[in-house]
Amino acid sequence: CNMENIDPVGIHTGESIVVAPSHTLNDYEYNMLRDTAIKVIRYFKIVGECNIQFALDPKSHDYYIIEVNARLSRSSALASKATGYPLAYIAAKLSLGMSLTDLKNSVTGETTACFEPSLDYCVVKIPR
């Protein structure tokens, strides 16, 4: 699930307004960051949940990786709520040696867990 902090870099994610899916990225920017995230995950051989935070200059398309979190986080909880995809459950099963193709989608009971959720709606998190 791609999410976007509306506040500028330097504001902690927990204190930032977050929208999912992102609203200011064009298709090129989204795919550039997605491809980079997949390369990072493969480089570090991460299995399970991971979130990567980027800072992007929309004028030059220069970007920086701010954080790589190979763990469940508050962002993971929001992504699970936004998509209905049970990240914690799936990550636990993967850590036990199961593969995504072994796991059934808990919503459909038919398809596997091996898919990338996409949203046709908007989710907004506003801090207290």
Image (tube, rainbow, N blue to C red):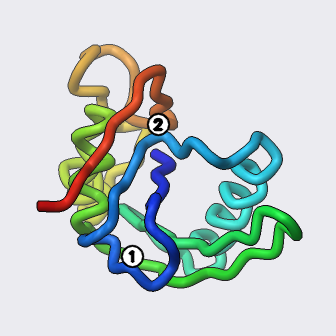
Q: Amino acid at mark 2?
A: Cys
Residue 83, given in percent of the width and then of the height, sits at 33, 34
Task: Give the residue furthest to the left.
Answer: 128
Q: Residues within 10 Å of mark 1 (few under 14, many from 20)?
A: some
27 vs 108, nearest the viewer: 27
Quarter of the rendering containing residue 127 = bottom left
Structural distance between the alpha carbons of marks 2 and 1: 19 Å
Q: Is residue 70 above or below residue 97?
A: below
At mark 2, the secondary structure is loop
- Residue at x 81% of width, y 75% of height: 62
Q: Is residue 46 above or below residue 119?
A: below
Residue 44, given in percent of the width and then of the height, sits at 57, 81
Task: Give the residue furthest to the right.
Answer: 60
- Residue at x 23% of width, y 20% of height: 107
| Residue 5, label in figure | none
Residue 27, given in percent of the width and then of the height, sits at 77, 40
70 vs 126, nearest the viewer: 126
| Residue 70, label in figure | 1
Is residue 87 rendered to the left or right of residue 20?
Answer: left
- Quarter of the image where the C terminus is located: bottom left
- Residue at x 36% of width, y 62% of height: 49
Q: Amino acid at mark 1?
A: Ala
- Residue at x 57% of width, y 70% of height: 41
User: Earlier along the polypeptide chain: callout 2 or callout 1?
Assistant: 1
| Residue 114, label in figure | 2
Q: Residues within 10 Å of mark 2 (few under 14, many from 20)?
A: few
